[in-house]
Amino acid sequence: MTKNNNKIFFPLNKTEIKQLNETDLDALIELDKQGLLIGAKEDINSYKQRLLNIEKDIVSLGHELQEKGRIELFNKVYASEKDIINTEILQEAKQQTESTYNFSINWIPGFYLSKGLGFLTGGCSATTESGFTFFLIRSSFSSSKKWLWYSRNELLSHELCHSARTAINDRRLEEFFAYKLSTSKLRKYLGNCFQGTYDAILLLTPIFLLLIIQLINTFFFFNLPIWIFWIIAAVYPVFLLIRNQLYRNYYFKARKKLNATLDNKLVDSILFRCTSEEIIEIGKFDNNSKELMKWFKAKEEKELRWKVINKRFIKN
């Protein structure tokens, strides 16, 4: 589709996608720059199929908007063409992802929503089984850069990070990379505490249990030992903090090792494209640049993703 401030488009058509091959690293690097990262263990055929699926979904979405005037996003929540986030609004967020992680996305559909988001939710992204991602932000952001404690730019750049790393399929440091762009030191530090939906459930369940025990003791004159439930309520928050710090340590240890070998302006971009297992492995290297370069070479021989990483960020 034609690129326009209020149109949905994809940077390649079906013919261009089918013509991609693993030897044309320059073409794959251009796609990497546009946030179409090659996934962990993904070969050229599975990568092309994912791009074809995304292109099909985006074109279908655009056609449906043109023909019906609106699309159903989920559960009878609709969006029309006027709800599409203008590319000029995305520009500041794109500049942030470009400067930090060396990618700039302008093809993912984003919509303003007046309903359908949680009461205190500023925005979110959704990814279909085909790999197609779109994101939604509160309609208040169409006329304001701030809503409650949310910043429009931070929210958009956060969701763009999730969209780009979807193919990496690694949740251990997913929120870390997204919150790294936050202007809040607290969000930067605590953002990666929640690595899955179960984390929030396991955090809140003991708190509700504590509340119930308090109510029972108060209204039914029981004398259940409340201190036991305070301990139970504290266990999971402590676990989240310890796990968060552990993965932060993994990241910064790997970053230190890469900084000793490479241009430090590119280090965050490399780690952004790594799995958490790879980040842990990088951090285990001694201060030996030759051994690390051998590791890069071995990864390049096994994975298409690393062919692109090596040519773009390591051998450039």
Image (cartoon, rainbow, N blue to C red):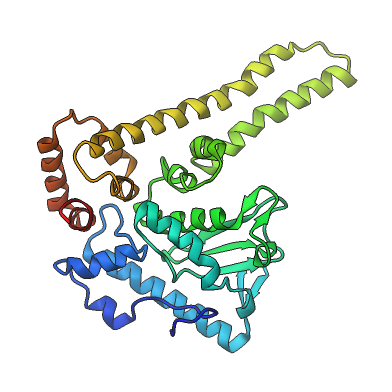
Q: Which quarter of the picture shows residue 259?
A: top left
Q: Nearer the viewer, residue 254 or 131?
A: 254
Q: Nearer the viewer, residue 61 or 288?
A: 288
The quarter of the image holding the N terminus is: bottom left
The quarter of the image holding the C terminus is: bottom left
Asked whether residue 264 is in view, the answer is: yes
Residue shown at the point (61%, 61%) measured from the top left:
137
- The answer to whether residue 253 is above or below residue 112 is above
Residue shown at the point (67%, 62%) measured from the top left:
144
Q: Position of residue 270 (x, y in %)?
A: 28, 48
Q: Which quarter of the picture shows residue 173?
A: top left
Q: Is 201 placed left or right of 227 in the picture? A: left
Judged from this view, the residue extending furthest toward the bottom is 67
Q: How many marks?
A: 0
Q: Position of residue 60 (x, y in %)?
A: 48, 80
- The answer to whether residue 297 is above or below residue 236 is below
Q: Is 219 placed left or right of 62 in the picture? A: right
Asked whether residue 74 is in view, the answer is: no
Q: Is 222 placed left or right of 37 in the picture? A: right
Residue shown at the point (23%, 46%) measured from the top left:
263
Q: Which quarter of the picture shows residue 264?
A: top left
Q: Is 190 placed left or right of 252 in the picture? A: right
Q: Position of residue 280 (x, y in %)?
A: 29, 34
Q: Position of residue 216 (x, y in %)?
A: 83, 21
